[in-house]
Amino acid sequence: MSEKEVNNVAINWYPGHMAKARRQMEEQLKLVDIVIELRDARIPEASANPILAELSKNKRVLIVLNKADLADPEESRKWKEHYENCLIVNSSSDNLSKLVVNEVKRILQDKLDRAKARGIRKISLRAMVVGIPNVGKSTFINNIVKKKVAKAENRPGVTKSLQWIRLNEDVELLDTPGVLWPKIENQDDARLLALIGSINDDILDKQDLVLFGLKLLKEKYPGLISERYGVDENQDELIRQIGQAKLWLSNDGEVDMAKTVEVILKDIRSNKIGRITWQDA
Ligand SMILES: Nc1nc2c(ncn2[C@@H]2O[C@H](COP(=O)(O)OP(=O)(O)O)[C@@H](O)[C@H]2O)c(=O)[nH]1
Ligand SMILES: [Mg+2]
């Protein structure tokens, strides 16, 4: 399958969708001071959107690596250092709103200072959340907004009326997130997204996907597979070894490869193997 096909089939993002999402994002970006880009802490680069950096060239961006509860904490620390402005979060954690508001104010401190110097006592820093599907945008917004009241507002040039929600005296948030497609520039990006369950794996060969996952695990977390399944992870035919060790067999006594593949994939996605970060900072 060509990579173009991967792109289209996996995500259902067709050129028409993409053009529309892009236009919408461009309009919304005009209204905000800062973009809060949610990504998945397990795959910080593959869960980025490929055109957001270009669209938000003159904007401040806060990268929020979400679902950090599923990622490797040590790797998350490295990723935090890697990006200019970055928070490592779990979108249902208690202190999220304060954390985000403080970070937004820190990043936009110059703007606050300028307003103050000009005698403007009250300004609103405006933020919006963007990210690929399933990265946790709704959970994140619901958490930081809680019971705060949305106020509707019409702005010229924007067809739909937008809801802004005040998070504190300085910061307002657009109540609906911007959704953009994930970065699928090659098979590996697609596989990484599928491994964490972010895209449908229907178009990928599952055995191939699991082999890819096991290979990465062996490189990044040596010993983990051996420990989990009671096998020597450096032997050939690792999937078969695992099926044999766990006795995932068909009626004829042979390893049930399809089942073994399914179970390993499920173990990976449900973090049974551990907190894994698949991409290095
Ligand atoms: N473990 C974990 N799951 C999360 C987190 N944030 C969201 N989720 C789950 O991820 C899935 C997608 O979340 P949702 O907010 O609907 O994503 P959206 O498509 O970006 O709006 C849901 O099952 C959430 O419960 C998080 O920080 N940690
Ligand atoms: Mg949502």
Image (cartoon, rainbow, N blue to C red):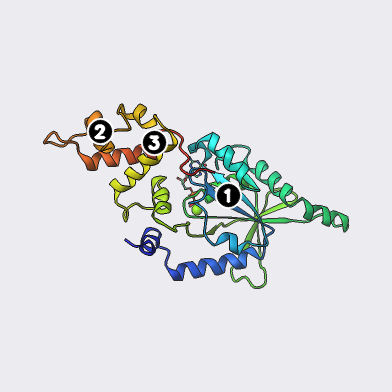
Where does the image place residue 112, in percent across and percent down from the top left?
A: 79, 53
Find disc 1 in the rendering and name its residue. 141
Residue 103 visible to an observer of this rendering: yes
Q: Secondary structure at mark 1?
A: helix
Q: Earlier in the sequence, mark 1 or mark 2?
A: 1
Q: Quick one: quadrant of the C terminus?
A: top right
User: Residue placed at 32% from the left, 33% from the top?
Assistant: 234
Q: Secondary structure at mark 2?
A: helix
User: Residue placed at 56% from the left, 69% from the top?
Assistant: 23
Q: Which mark is residue 195?
A: none
What's under tag 1, amino acid-wise?
A: Ile
Tell me how far mark 1 sits from mark 3, CA to CA: 36 Å
Position of 266 with respect to 248 (left or right) is right
Tell me how far mark 1 sits from mark 2, CA to CA: 44 Å
Find disc 2 in the rendering and name its residue. 241
What's under tag 3, amino acid-wise?
A: Lys
Label 2: few (<14), some (14–19) or many (≥20) C-alpha neighbours in 10 Å: some
Pick the front one: 253 or 128: 253
Q: How many numbered discs sit on the rendered protein? A: 3
Where does the image place residue 147, in percent across and percent down from the top left?
A: 62, 46
Pick the front one: 229 or 231: 231
Which residue is the extreme one toward the left? 252
Q: Secondary structure at mark 3?
A: helix
Find disc 3 in the rendering and name its residue. 218
Where does the image place residue 242, in percent across and percent down from the top left?
A: 27, 33
Q: Quick one: quadrant of the N terminus?
A: bottom left
| Tag 1 near tag 3, CB within 8 Å | no
